[in-house]
Amino acid sequence: MNKNPVASFLLPDDFRRPPLVRMLHEGRIVGEASRHAVRGLSAVRTRAPYAGGSTSRDADPVLLVPGFMAGDYTLAALARRLRREGHRTYRAGIPLANMGCTLDTAEMIESRLEAIVARREQRVQIVGHSLGGMLARGVAARRPDLVSGIVTMGSPVLAPGAHHRSLTVFVLGLVAMSKVGVSGVMNETCVGGECALESFQECQVALPAEVSFTAIYSRNDGIVDWRACLDPAAAHVEVKASHIGMAVDPRVGDQVLSALRSHREESVAASTLRVATA
């Protein structure tokens, strides 16, 4: 009997689950976390004195969305880094673990974006890790009036089912929990029915030209097939991090910052062109 609850359409023929040995790459998280700690100490030592240490918050607001079975806290280090560079950062509102219905989570993210745009009076950039990036991709396609750019990190938008079998164990657990009445977790429809299909199709919708897109991926990814992260609509940036380590490795943070700045420049240039031709 097939114990995999994930729908077959989430794993197209051109993609595959990472082999067991690939999980060894996730051991890099120790070095990546250490690298983050060292970079953080360096930033503290070189921080400007109190009198002149305030940072101008003129960069785009950024919403950070965590991956599967992860909460907002997993992107706290990246958020601090972005704030040091002038971004106002916002949590997705997933305190413990991203394990609910993807359509419900996408709706929550959309509401968060509406509130941020109303407050800041400008569109938001989204940084999403893994599943968080897929959610960002779908919301951006549906609401380009709220989103100016997205950065995905290890997000298998082309084949969500191309993940390591260990993740299937977690999915089975969530489905079992839903069957006994636990609310707020993925059920069979979310991973293998109409809900899963709708979420997947949203990730395939063409993005409007005014939404910039950068996809960060790693061939060392031990959780998802890195090829599934190469959305044709995105600018691709390769890093050497593990899948989990993308959230903390400062070298990935460098690429995220670069992408956000590039997106901002593209948005400003497009606005200037529209004014000039009006």
Image (cartoon, rainbow, N blue to C red):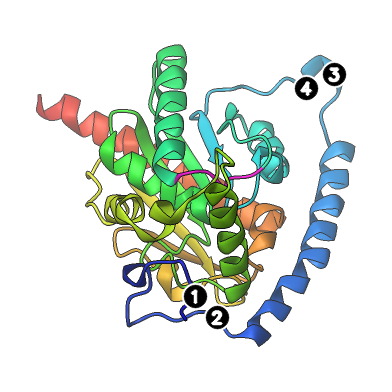
Q: Disc 2 or 4, which lies upstream in sequence?
A: 2
Task: Tell me if residue 99 is in the magenta stretch.
Answer: yes
Q: Which residues are magenta?
A: 97-101
Image position, residue 123 (x, y; %): 38, 27
Nearer to us of marks 4 and 1 is: 1
Distance from label 2 to label 1 (Cα)? 6 Å
The circle drawn on residue 225 is: 1
Identify which residue is drawn at 58% across, 85% down: 19
Name the residue type under label 3.
Answer: Tyr
Q: Which residue is mark 4?
A: 53
Q: Are marks 2 and 4 in contact (CB under 8 Å)?
A: no
Q: Is residue 144 visible?
A: yes
On whether residue 193 falls in the magenta region, the answer is: no
**Which label was assigned to residue 50?**
3
The dominant secondary structure in magenta is loop
> Depth check: 128 or 215 in front?
128
The answer to the question of whether label 2 and label 1 lie on touching residues, with beta carbons closer than 8 A, is: yes
Name the residue located 83 percent from the left edge and 65 percent from the top edge: 30
Q: Pointer 2: what residue?
A: 18
